[in-house]
Amino acid sequence: MNPNDDGSYLRVARKVLHVSAPLMGAMLGNLIMMLVDRICLARYSSDTLEASGPAIHTAMAIVLFFTGFAGFSRSCVAQAFGKSGQAQAAYQAALGILVGVALALILCLMAPLIERIPFLSHRPLATTRLESQFLFWSAFFGAAMTLNMALSAYFSGIGRTRVTLVVGLIGQAVVICMIVGLVFGKYGLPELGMRGSAIGTLIGTLTMSVCYVGCMPREVWQGLRDVLSGQRARLGAELLARIKKGLVIGSSAGLNNLGSAAFVWIVAGLGAIGLAANNVNLTVNYLGGVPLIGLGIGCGVLCGNAIGEGNFPQVSKFLFVTMAIELAYLAIISFLQIATPHFLLNPFGLHDKGEEIQQVSVATVRVLWLYSLAFAFSMTGASVLESMGLTRFLFLTRLLLMWALSIPVTYVLVSAHTGSASFLPTCWVVGSLFEGAIGAMYFWRIRAAVRNRQNGIVLVEQAASS
C-alpha cells in the first residue's frame, strides 16, 4: 500500500465514524448505567448517598488500574492486525486474555484487603460499613471488567466495534435491572441496599463476559491453547514486554482517576454549597465528555492499524479528522452549557436547591466547555500514544502536570478561599488549563513520533523474536 494514497479526508471520516460510533454508543450506555446507580443509591437512604461517593471513587481508582493494564492488549491487537492480519491479531488477543485472567484473579484475591480501606478514615461507622460492603464486591465486578477488557480488545483492535456495542448494551440493561431490583428489593429480588448496587453490577458484567466468550472466534482460543502449551518460542519475553507496558498504562489510568477524585475532595473545602454545586456539575460534565471517549478509542485503534502497516502519515489524518468531529460535537455542547445552563442542570434537581447553589452551579456550567475541550485533546492524545506503545511518556506527563502541579495549585487556591463557593468556576478553569497542557504535551509527542516513525510496540516485538 502506498502510504500517501489513502483516500480523501471524507473517506477517512467515514472510517473513523464506522469504528468509533459503536464505541460512542457503548460509552453512552455506561453513562446511563452510572446515572441509574447514583440515583438509586441517593434515593435509598441518606447513608447510602453519603457512602456512595467515596466508595465509587475508591473502587474505580483500583479497578481502572487493572482495566487499563488489560486494555493495552487492544493496541497490540490493532498493530498486529494492520501488520499481519487476522492470525497474528488472534494470537495477540490470546496473550491479552491470559494477562487479563491473571489480573482478574489477583483483584479477586485482594477483596479482603480492599474492604478494609474505609476503616482507615475517621468517618461515621455507619457510612464506612456501607463503603466496605461496596468495596468488597467491587473487587469481583472489577475482576469481571478486567476480563471483559481483555476479551473486547480483540473485537475493538480489528475494528469490529459493533460487537462491543451490542455486548455492552446487553450487559448494561442487565446491570440497570439488577441494581434497581437488588437495591430496593423489586422484581422478587432481595433488598440489599448498597451491597445490591455492587452485586447488580457484577451480574451484568459477568453477562457481558459470557457474550464475549460466545462471540470469540476459534482462532483466538487456538492461540490461547498454543500459549498455554508452550508452543510459542520466547513466550516469556513477549509476556514480559506486554506486562511492562500494561503496568505503566494501568498506573497512568489510576493516577488520572485518583486526580479527579482528589479534585472533588479539595473543592469540598469551598463549603457545603460549593460541594453541592460541584456534584451537580460533575454529572453535566460527564454528559459532555463521556461520548468523546469512544471517538478517542476508535482513533487509537485506527492509528494502531496504520502503524502496524508502517503507514505513519495516516496517523495524522486519523487524528485530524477525529479532532474535527470532537470539536463539532463540543461546539454544540458548549453552546448548551453557555446559553441554556438551566436546561442542563434542572433534570438533576437544581430547581430544588437553594438560590446560592443555583447561582454557583450556573456560573460553573458556563466554564465546563473549557474542560471538555482540554479533555478531548488529552484523552485522544493518550489513546494514540498508547497505540504507539509510548506508555512511559503518558505516565510521566500525567504524574508531573497533574500530581506535581495541578493538584497542589488547586489545593493552595482553595485553601485561600475556604468557604467561598463562588470560587468553584475558577477551580474548574485552573484544572482545565492543566488538562489542556497535558493534551498539548501528548500532541507534541505524537508529532515527534510520526516524524521519526517511532513505534514502541514494534520495537518490543522485534526484540522478543530476535
Image: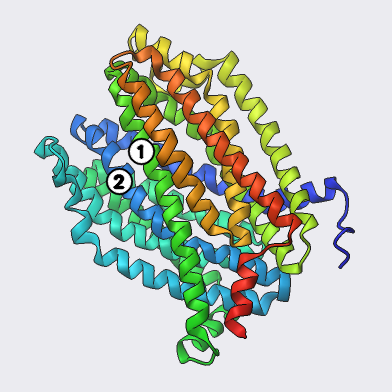
Vertical order, 264 against 95 (above or below):
above
SS for tag 1?
helix
- Judged from this view, the residue extending furthest toward the top is 355
Q: Are marks 1 and 2 in contact (CB under 8 Å)?
A: yes
Q: Position of residue 97 (x, y in %)?
A: 48, 72
Residue depicted at 32% across the width and 70% down the height: 105
Residue depicted at 66% across the width and 67% down the height: 79
Vertical order, 340 against 193 (above or below):
above
Q: CA distance from mark 1 to mark 2?
A: 8 Å
Assess disc 1: are there few (<14), some (14-19) or many (≥20) residues with their C-alpha within 10 Å of its C-alpha.
some
SS for tag 2?
helix
Task: Say which amino acid is labelled 2.
Answer: Thr
Q: Which mark is residue 261?
A: 1
Looking at the image, which is closer to me, 463 or 27?
Answer: 463
Q: Judge from the rendering whether residue 115 lies leftward or rightward of residue 104; answer left or right.
A: left
Q: Judge from the rendering whether residue 114 lies leftward or rightward of residue 320; answer left or right.
A: left
Residue depicted at 44% across the width and 46% down the height: 399
Q: Position of residue 53 (x, y in %)?
A: 29, 37
Q: Earlier along the polypeptide chain: callout 1 or callout 2?
A: 2
Quadrant position of the N terminus in the picture: bottom right
Residue at mark 2: 58
Task: Say which amino acid is labelled 1.
Answer: Ala
- Is residue 217 among what the camera can see? no
